[in-house]
């Protein structure tokens, strides 16, 4: 079973960390990226770079910014392959942002084997 | 460039979906199948579409925080918003305009929205 871990935190925080703290957290992120349970994931560029697209009728509406403004923003995600939701939450708790922000864990929906 | 496309749903649509019988839900899904097939059929061979994840309902979400060494797990999504993330697709596009052109063909764009975020390449 796959779980998507959505990583929420305050964007400015990284800039306020000391080089040692950054190095330690980066090490934790790299270790998670290389963990056996990890199937994917990415770091996202800042929310200032977000573009939101809607199509209504024949018109494509493009707006700058995220689909919703939040104090803690989505900064990245991991995909974990785990036997249970509890196990996925254990992995989510290892993400450094869990200590200051929050990790939303969502089961990946499997539709009758249509997807790979 | 790599982009993450966040596929959203309206909370009302999610609620309506959850109130449906399995047959009704299957029929509602079937309506969008041709649009998805067109997307994958026409853009799949170009390599523009990377991994994709359709997520279970936001109400199945758990939110994990660690404070003072203690792991706190709560039921529900991180934020209770009008539009909620329902899926994520990884896209490969020349530039933002090309990514927008792809996003404008992802079926949820007609009823909710697609947020594009550039991926930081390490």
Image (cartoon, coloured by chain):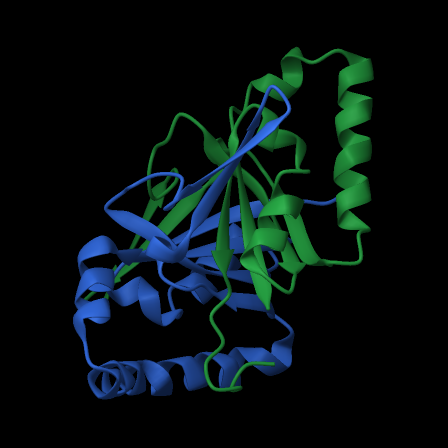
Chain colours: A green, B blue
Quarter of the C terminus of chain A within the rendering? bottom right
Taking the image as shown, residue A94 lies to the left or right of residue B20, namely right
**Residue A89, percent across and down?**
58, 47
Residue B122 visible somewhere in the drawing: no
B11 is higher (above) or lower (below) than A72: below
Examine the image and state in which quarter residue B47 appears: bottom right
Of the pair A68 and A87, the residue shown nearer to us: A87
Residue at position x 49%, y 76% in the image: A110
Q: Is residue A96 left or right of residue B79?
A: right
User: Where does residue A83 sit, x and y in percent of width and height?
Assistant: 64, 65
Measuring 46% from the left and 66% from the top, which residue is drawn there? B102
The image shows residue B55 at horizontal and vertical percentages of 45, 63
Location of residue A69 in the rendering, given as x and y in whole percent from the top left corner: 34, 33
Q: Quadrant of residue A56?
A: bottom left
When the figure is inspected, residue A116 is found, relative to residue B100, above or below; the finding is below
Viewer-closest of A17 and A37: A37
């Amino acid at each position: 079973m796959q779980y998507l871990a959505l990583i929420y935190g305050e964007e400015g925080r990284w800039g306020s960390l000391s080089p040692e703290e950054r190095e330690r957290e980066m090490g934790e992120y790299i270790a998670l990226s290389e963990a056996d349970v990890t199937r994917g994931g990415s770091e996202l560029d800042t929310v200032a770079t977000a573009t939101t697209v809607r199509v209504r009728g024949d018109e494509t509406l493009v707006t700058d910014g995220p689909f919703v403004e939040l104090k803690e923003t989505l900064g990245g995600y991991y995909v974990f392959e785990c036997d249970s939701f509890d196990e996925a939450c254990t992995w989510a708790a290892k993400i450094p942002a869990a200590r200051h922000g929050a990790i939303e864990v969502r089961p990946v929906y499997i539709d009758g084997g249509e997807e790979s | 460039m790599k982009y993450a496309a966040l596929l959203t749903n309206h909370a009302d649509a999610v609620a309506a979906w959850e109130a449906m019988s399995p047959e009704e839900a299957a029929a509602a899904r079937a309506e969008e199948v041709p649009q998805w097939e067109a997307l994958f059929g026409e853009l799949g061979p170009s390599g523009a579409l990377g991994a994709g994840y359709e997520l279970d309902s936001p109400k199945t979400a758990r939110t994990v925080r660690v404070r003072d060494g203690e792991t706190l797990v709560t039921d529900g999504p991180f934020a209770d918003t009008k539009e909620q993330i329902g899926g994520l697709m990884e896209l490969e596009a020349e530039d933002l305009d090309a990514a927008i052109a792809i996003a404008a063909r992802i079926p949820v764009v007609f009823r909710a929205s697609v947020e594009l975020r550039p991926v930081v390449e390490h």
